[in-house]
Image: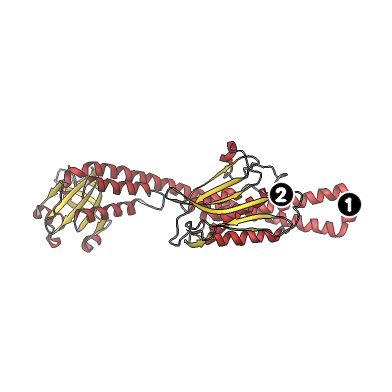
């Protein structure tokens, strides 16, 4: 074992501080690595260490135990130990009497490696026979443990942050459900009573008043769509991920075929690269892919020779998927607004929508550990790229793409 290896362990731990890694798993994982690479069979993590009066003994909480079922039964309890075993500089002991004074003779411990993190916490590795190492264990661990202490504090700070974020998400979800419930009742009333007016008194209304009535219904319909989109956004944040291999190519085929059936008058060239597979939650990734493809379909509606492409590529070591179109595009100066709820780069009079779709896509992709970004220029179309964990199934190795044109006649004016 060497210092570079242990520092590599610390770096790995620092990279996984994502909220799903709490302080205890972090400590256990580090302790397991220490045992594996040093050859010690048993390891303890002791914290809340306090000296007992003027004695040479301390009181320490046994936080983590690996390798000794008898000591594991005392996890969470305070032990009285010789101060020399847990405080001071890192040290390697071959003093069975000192170890027996701390843990009793039944354990048969004959060697210990003391690795203090700070005055109130330490690792203690135990063995029943001599352990050898190519390098002095005590000298190599000082910078390692200092770094571990910092990583552990970062983990704890991150845990506090994640707890606050979880509370905020729960409050947001409760608010969204409350608002959606409270708003749907008056919306239903607006639709119901406007239907009665249309059925029983539409002919008695002046054309101007008929237009007002239709505007009321359109506004109510838009509000209902916004409520539905808010609920989708909320579900994308809280839903439990059930990862499995998902054939994204097949999903794209189904979505685009459905869009083509809904607008048979449009002619769109569709290219889908076959065999694109990713590890993802089928429902959530389906929502994200549908939003991206529906956007491509929507923003190419004024293009007489519309083209939509779904494909994959490799950037470095990342598996990247993309949705590309030759629609209206957008100005990259405003790209930071793309994934913000209710922020739209095109007006409602140009293209319908609520401005929530891409925010939902971003949340889904980030929950999978990926990222999403876009490239575009006005009048030159857009490409949205996103990363997902690779599946064991072969995916982006096939360069060929299926190409077809959606059935239809002349393009309908407007969208």
Q: How many marks?
A: 2
Q: Visible in this render: residue 18?
A: yes
**Horizontally, is 412 left or right of 346 in the view?**
right
Q: Residue furthest front?
A: 400
Question: In front: 240, or 168?
Answer: 240
Q: Earlier in the sequence, mark 2 or mark 1?
A: 1
Percent x, y of residue 196: 82, 59
Please name the residue that numbered disc 1 is placed on. Answer: 205
Image disc number at residue 182: none
Q: Secondary structure at mark 1?
A: loop
Percent x, y of residue 374: 55, 44
Q: Nearer the viewer, mark 2 or mark 1?
A: 2
Neighbor class of circle 2 (other Cα within 10 Å; few <14, some 14-19, many 20+) is some
**Horizontally, is 138 left or right of 360 in the view?**
left
Question: In front: 398, or 88?
Answer: 398
Please say if 145 is above or below 103: above
Q: Visible in this render: residue 226?
A: no
User: What residue is at 79 percent from the left and 57 percent from the top?
Assistant: 193
Percent x, y of residue 134: 15, 49
Q: Residue furthest top?
A: 333
**Horizontally, is 355 left or right of 31 in the view?**
right
Percent x, y of residue 88: 17, 42
User: What residue is at 67 percent from the left and 42 percent from the top?
Assistant: 346
- By what rule are the colours in the image chosen? secondary structure
**Horizontally, is 394 left or right of 142 in the view?**
right
Please say if 381 is above or below 65: above
Please name the residue that numbered disc 2 is placed on. Answer: 304
């Amino acid at each position: 074992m060497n210092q570079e290896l242990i520092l590599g362990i610390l770096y790995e731990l620092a990279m996984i501080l994502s909220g799903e890694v709490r302080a205890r798993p972090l400590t256990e994982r580090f302790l397991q690595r220490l045992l594996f690479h040093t050859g010690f069979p048993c390891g303890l993590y002791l914290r809340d260490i306090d000296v007992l009066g003027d004695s040479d003994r301390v009181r320490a909480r046994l936080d983590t135990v690996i390798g000794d079922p008898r000591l594991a039964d005392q996890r969470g309890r305070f032990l009285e130990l010789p101060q020399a075993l847990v405080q001071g500089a890192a040290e390697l002991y071959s003093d069975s009497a000192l170890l027996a004074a701390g843990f009793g003779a039944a354990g048969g411990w004959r060697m210990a490696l003391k690795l203090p993190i700070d005055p109130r916490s330490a690792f203690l590795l135990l063995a029943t026979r001599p352990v050898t190492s190519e390098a002095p264990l005590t000298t190599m661990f000082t910078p390692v443990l200092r770094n571990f202490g910092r990583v552990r504090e970062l983990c704890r700070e991150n845990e506090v942050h994640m707890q606050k974020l979880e509370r905020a998400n729960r409050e947001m979800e409760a608010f969204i459900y409350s608002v959606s419930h409270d708003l749907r009742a008056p919306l239903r009333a607006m639709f119901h009573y406007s239907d009665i007016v249309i059925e029983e008194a539409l002919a008695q209304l002046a054309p101007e008043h008929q237009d007002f009535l239709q505007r009321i219904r359109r506004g109510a319909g838009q509000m209902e769509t916004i409520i539905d989109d808010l609920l989708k956004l909320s579900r994308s944040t809280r839903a439990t991920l059930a990862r499995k291999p998902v054939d994204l190519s097949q999903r794209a085929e189904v979505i685009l075929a459905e869009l083509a059936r809904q607008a048979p008058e449009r002619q769109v060239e569709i290219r889908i690269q076959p065999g694109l597979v990713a590890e993802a939650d089928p429902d959530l990734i389906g929502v994200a892919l549908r939003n991206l493809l529906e956007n491509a379909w929507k923003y190419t509606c004024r293009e007489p020779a519309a083209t939509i492409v779904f494909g994959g590529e490799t950037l470095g070591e990342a598996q990247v998927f993309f949705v590309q179109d030759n629609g209206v595009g957008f100005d990259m100066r405003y790209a930071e607004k793309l994934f913000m709820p209710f922020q739209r780069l095109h007006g409602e009079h140009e293209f319908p929508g609520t401005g929530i779709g891409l925010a939902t896509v971003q949340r889904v992709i980030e929950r999978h550990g990926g990222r999403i970004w876009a490239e575009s220029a006005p009048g030159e179309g857009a490409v949205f790229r996103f990363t997902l964990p690779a599946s064991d199934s072969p995916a982006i190795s096939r360069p060929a793409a299926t190409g077809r044109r959606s059935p239809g006649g002349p393009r309908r004016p407007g969208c």
